[in-house]
């Protein structure tokens, strides 16, 4: 019987998934590259919109919260950088995660013709969306690094840990994508649930405000949101320059490994009926 806490089964699934992704890495990368190129093909500005849409969104958030609401963060030993760096440190990985979830919820239905081909490894479909999204995130992290250099004349040493956190995030995104892709093939409403959840989750993460500004009576909701731990981990690297939230790293790594395996096991279990429900 399937159990999410079956250590032996989880270890076997982890090895199986790593082997599968390694074996089909060229196909996955080719599909991700094609997705990036074809998404805005035929448009005047082309692939610029892959960066343009989230860039405009981030500029709106910066304007609203930094200038309209005049959020004041930074300039102290505890909060070393400015509010823009604080917000973007969490917003950039969250937007990438959100986009990957939206893609995953419809990836099986959108590729029904491919899924019905017995010889095609459908396991690569959710992953190629994750890779395409991470490419955009990498560009924005580079822009954040440039902004930090311009405004504060130096980068934090913790930027060296960015590849480690990037891998942990990728594991979480792949696992969630497998889960949403599998369930989304059976229940087409998943994409709407993901959209509503993303809207709510956005406002209960510690990236638009510092946790201390939240009333103590409702502050616990930040800890219920699993994405808060990703945000805290990225803030440690991109904003604080120290392990301000060491427990968040432990939770984020643990959750990422768990969902990486759990999502794949659910996908593997449900994929046998994809052809019948499409």
Image (cartoon, helix red, strand yellow):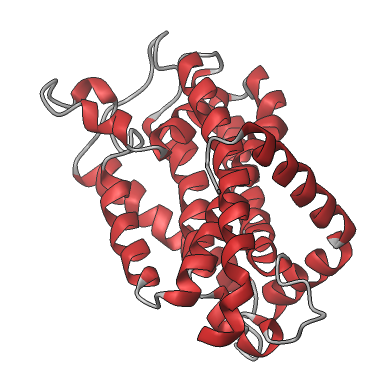
Percent of width and height locating residue 74: 37, 21
> Does residue 212 appear to the left or right of 90 in the view shown?
left
Percent of width and height locating residue 189: 34, 74
> Does residue 156 appear to the left or right of 23 in the view shown?
left
User: From this viewpoint, is residue 102 visible?
Assistant: yes
Counting labels gives 0
Percent of width and height locating residue 99: 50, 61
Q: Residue at x 33, y 33 (%)?
A: 206
Residue 33, relative to residue 257: is it above or below? Answer: below
User: From this viewpoint, is residue 278 visible?
Assistant: no
Residue 179, relative to residue 149: is it above or below? Answer: below
Instruction: Please tell me which residue lies in front, 105 or 205.
Output: 105
Q: Residue at x 51, y 52 (%)?
A: 97
Residue at the limit of the structure toward the top, as seen here: 77
Q: Residue at x 40, y 17 (%)?
A: 79
Residue 63, relative to residue 122: is it above or below? Answer: above
Residue at the limit of the structure toward the front, as seen here: 1
Instruction: Please tell me which residue lies in front, 268 or 28.
Output: 268
> Does residue 65 appear to the left or right of 257 in the view shown?
left
Instruction: Please tell me which residue lies in front, 120 or 230.
Output: 120
Percent of width and height locating residue 274: 58, 79
Q: Residue at x 71, y 72 (%)?
A: 122
Instruction: Please tell me which residue lies in front, 185 or 228.
Output: 185
């Amino acid at each position: 019987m399937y159990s999410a806490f079956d250590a032996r089964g989880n270890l076997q699934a982890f090895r199986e998934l790593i082997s599968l992704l390694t074996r089909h890495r060229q196909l996955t990368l080719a599909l991700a590259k094609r997705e990036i190129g074809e998404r805005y093909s035929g448009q005047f500005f082309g692939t610029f919109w892959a960066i343009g849409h989230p860039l405009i969104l981030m500029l709106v958030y910066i304007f609203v919260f930094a200038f309209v609401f005049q959020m004041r963060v930074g300039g102290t030993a505890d909060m070393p950088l400015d509010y823009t760096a604080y917000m973007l440190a969490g917003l950039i990985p969250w937007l990438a995660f959100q986009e990957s979830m939206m893609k995953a919820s419809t990836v099986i239905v959108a590729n029904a013709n491919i899924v019905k081909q017995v010889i095609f490894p459908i396991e690569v479909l959710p992953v190629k969306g994750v890779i395409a999204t991470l490419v955009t995130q990498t560009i924005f992290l580079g822009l954040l690094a440039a902004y930090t250099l311009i405004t504060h004349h130096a980068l934090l040493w913790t930027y060296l840990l960015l590849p480690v956190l990037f891998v942990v995030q990728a594991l979480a995104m792949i696992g969630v994508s497998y889960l949403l892709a599998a369930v989304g093939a059976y229940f087409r409403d998943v994409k709407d649930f993901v959209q509503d959840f993303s809207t709510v989750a956005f406002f209960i993460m510690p990236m638009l405000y510092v946790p201390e500004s939240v009333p103590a009576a409702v502050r616990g909701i930040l800890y219920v949101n699993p994405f808060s731990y990703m945000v805290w981990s990225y803030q440690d690297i991109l904003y604080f320059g120290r392990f301000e939230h060491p427990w968040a790293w432990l939770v984020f790594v643990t959750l990422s490994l768990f969902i990486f395996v759990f999502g794949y096991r659910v996908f593997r279990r449900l994929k046998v009926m994809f052809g019948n429900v499409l």
